[in-house]
Image (cartoon, rainbow, N blue to C red):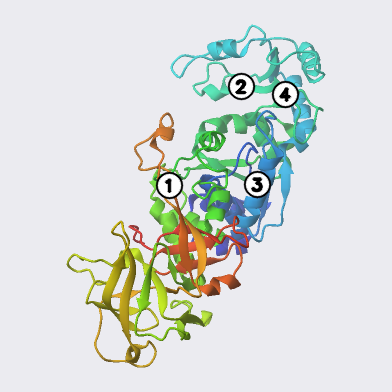
Amino acid sequence: MSDNIENNKESVNFIQKIINEDLANGTYGSSVHTRFPPEPNGYLHIGHAKSICLNYGLAKKNNGIFNLRFDDTNPIKEDDSFVESIIKDVKWLCPDWDERIFYASDYFDKMYKYAIELINKGLAFVDDLSADEIREYRGTLTEPGKESPYRNRSIEENLKLFEEMKNGLYSNGEKVLRAKIDMKSPNINMRDPVIYRILHESHHNTGDKWCIYPMYDYAHPLEDAIEGITHSVCTLEFEDHRPFYDWLLSNIDEFKDAPTKQIEFAKLFLTKTMMGKRYLKKMVEEGYVEGWDDPRMPTVAGYRRRGYTPESINNFCESIGVSKAQSVVDIAMLEYAIRDDLSQKAPRTMAVLDPIKLIITNYPEDKVEYVEAGNNPDNKEMGSRMIPFCREIYIEREDFMENPPKKYFRLFPGNEVRLRNAYFVKCEDFIKDDDGNVIEVHCTYDPETKSGTGFTGRKVKGTLHWVSAKHCIDAEVRLYDYMMEDDNYDKSNFLEKLNQNSKIVLKNCKVEPSIKEHNIGERFQFLRHGYFIIDEDTTKDNLIFNRIVSLKSSYKK
């Protein structure tokens, strides 16, 4: 125990401070046990990633245990495909996780037994009020509720009715089981909350065994207690539910001595990003995106496909910290995290996204030579590669202008630039098509200016990237931008505010031939363009890249 406290003495995280106090006091012995408890009714988003990284991180820092537990108490919305996606996400974010996977539905028998215990103690009753009547009786934030006329049924009658509910004698909504607490409580969540409802639906895990299902607020604390969770870390919207969490565990004999401690922290909100599973689901179902893993989506699957690394997301979550204060985080911080991670990992390569042909008229037509280029200037250990160079190459269309403005240092008639890792070239002429578009730029080269030969002569201000027209590979490049144009939206109008240019597909891109040696999922920095990943849609005949992030950011560390 003392080692754990010593290891965490520098922590400023308020949750870690609570854990340190509990370790010092022996509240839970010397153990720390956390969990991430998603409902399998959609894919996880970046806000869930913060919770995963926090709970997993707290367990790791304290030599503890971390569970993934599915709160699968609502069979109407849940699906095995969501279960599978969540497991995949957690494995990806938590590489050392030992795959402790649990389900609320595994505890349905125990939850039923605890409900019987509450009835026997006079702390729960079967109610015949409809859902609308329960809401009416509940009162408001300023007015107390009133008791149900069925509140004072005898223990025997409640036991009989609850068993009949379990046995399927009643239809959906005909009866519910409610906790008996205080209808005058200032906290509405304590006004005899519903803890079981009738739902004649097949469950993805238990099939047709049950026709009554526990409510989330009842099931969640019991799941934590059954698993021996010491610190139940959740987001701020559950703060008002904590009194019921504590009330329930204090009234179940098995969990009275050292009940799980619920601790709340602020949710993650990102600029230019719509969050919330119901809204993401709407975008998927109505075809605004191409699925839950669309690289524009703020889902963990979407970020993974876009090319983000688990290290970048963990580092981002660590950098934004944990607090009780609700705020919106600049998405530039997330982009900074992936740039920072890939700067050391991603090899550099040249890619021309909007190609225009450049012909070096004084270069031999059949000659091919190879120039050396470093794979990563920030990581010399990544070595270098040899790039083919010949008479005809491609450059970016924006790197040539017939009539350039001032301080334009790229190619224009009479100007000289360096081709990266190769030679100086000077623009002598250009050719246009019938529509007036430049289709070829004609240059001459100076063979004495080859990179790496110690040339110390005249200097040029512009350096262009390029690829050999004879050796390059055709590629499709998908440029992704923010899903929301700005932050001037809300949940009622967000579909109207979607960025119509959030995905731009470029079909005629040219990349270095060395790319042929790489596989789906590998990442690169395209010089001047940003970081890219080979997308899973890639086939033998169609190489596809997703832009992960551009090179520039407004965020300063």
Residue 139 position in % (x across, y down): 50, 14
Q: Amino acid at mark 1?
A: Ser
Crowding at mark 4 (Cα within 10 Å: few <14, some 14-19, many 20+): many
Res 85 label: 3
Q: Which residue is mark 4?
A: 118
Name the outermost residue toward the top: 149
Between 425 and 193, the one nearer to me in the picture? 425
Determine the image quadrant of residue 377. Answer: bottom left
Q: Is residue 18 visible?
A: no
Looking at marks 3 and 2 on the same chain, the residue that comes earlier in the sequence is marked by: 3
Determine the image quadrant of residue 156. Answer: top right
- Label 3, label 2: how many angstroms apart (C-alpha)? 32 Å
Nearer mark to the viewer, of 1 and 4: 1
Residue 20 position in % (x across, y down): 56, 54
Residue at the (51%, 71%) spot, across then down: 345
Disc 2 is placed on an element classified as loop
Disc 4 is placed on an element classified as helix
In the rendered image, the vertical position of residue 107 relative to residue 394, given as above or below? above
Looking at marks 3 and 4 on the same chain, the residue that comes earlier in the sequence is marked by: 3
Between 480 and 155, the one nearer to me in the picture? 480
